[in-house]
Amino acid sequence: MSEADAVPSQVLAVLDDAAAGAAALELSSTLAHALRRALSVVYVESARSLVAAALPFTQVLSHAGSGWVPLLPADVEQGFRAHAARLRQLAERIALRDAVSWSLRVVRGSLPGAAIDLYAESDLLLLATAPPPRLPGEGRTRRPRRQPVVTVVTEGSEAGQRALVVATRLAQALAAVLETARVEPASDPTRQAATLSALSRSDVLVLPRAHVDPITLAMLRCPVLLVG
């Protein structure tokens, strides 16, 4: 079996929230179309949410606004199903528009952990990390439209060059501005993660997988395309 045959020809989109996932689906479908690949969507049900719901003191505000009520694991499971249904609708609409074949499956765990577990399935994995919280009044202010920004991290290696090639194709497909950043390998993973986190203002951050570990993934706050 050749090296090309060993890696399925697909783009993986890994996400755990329908709101954050919409942008990731747009990006991953656009990339799949540009590279003539299939799109595989993986929805991650948060195991941590179920653990939190099982605690006796966990409460949420009731829909009726009548006060705080206990959060039950069954409520979390219902939320999982609602998110999966919403993501399926979004994926179907976006993939149909881009003429891309697609699939969706559900796993349980954590977003960074699932991404690492799925490395063997594709050399292109787009991770939908949570966006930063909005400031008060920010949602009511309409910002002027701008070109998307694709930022690629290179370090002079073969992996960095491959990331640059993929980022260039994605930027062309999105009619986006392509920016490059160089991140030197650091002995302290936290320091390196903080450096990468500063690049999260981009619409999508393209990274060689050598730069990624769970600490880094937890700190990033924009869609991340892992190239490996």
Image: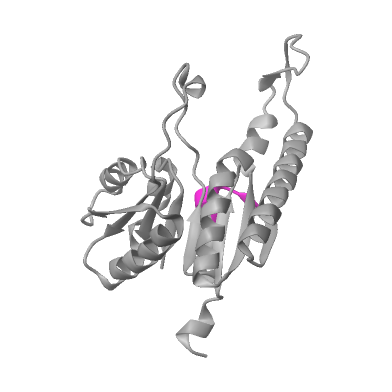
Front residue (pair 87, 97): 97
Location of residue 170 in the rendering, given as x and y in whole percent from the top left corner: 42, 61
Location of residue 134 in the rendering, given as x and y in whole percent from the top left corner: 47, 25
> Relative to 86, is 130 on the left or the right?
left
**Which quadrant would residue 38 be assigned to in this image?**
bottom right
Q: Which residue occupies the extreme bottom position in the image?
A: 1
Residue at point 59%, 45% (across, down)? 22
Residue 106 visible in rendering: no
Q: Residue 162: say if magenta.
A: no
Front residue (pair 110, 23): 23
> Relative to 34, is 186 on the left or the right?
left
Residue 201 visible in rendering: yes
* Residues rendered magenta in the picture: 107-114
- Quadrant occupied by the C terminus: bottom left
> Relative to 197, is 81 on the left or the right?
right
Location of residue 196 in the rendering, given as x and y in whole percent from the top left corner: 31, 46
In the rendered view, tell whether residue 145 sits above or below residue 98: above
Front residue (pair 29, 104): 29
In the rendered view, tell whether residue 99 sits above or below residue 71: below
Front residue (pair 35, 24): 35
Residue at point 74%, 34% (across, down)? 73
**Which quadrant would residue 107 be assigned to in this image?**
bottom right
Q: How many numbered discs?
A: 0
Location of residue 12 in the rendering, given as x and y in whole percent from the top left corner: 55, 62
In the rendered view, tell whether residue 37 sits above or below residue 116: below
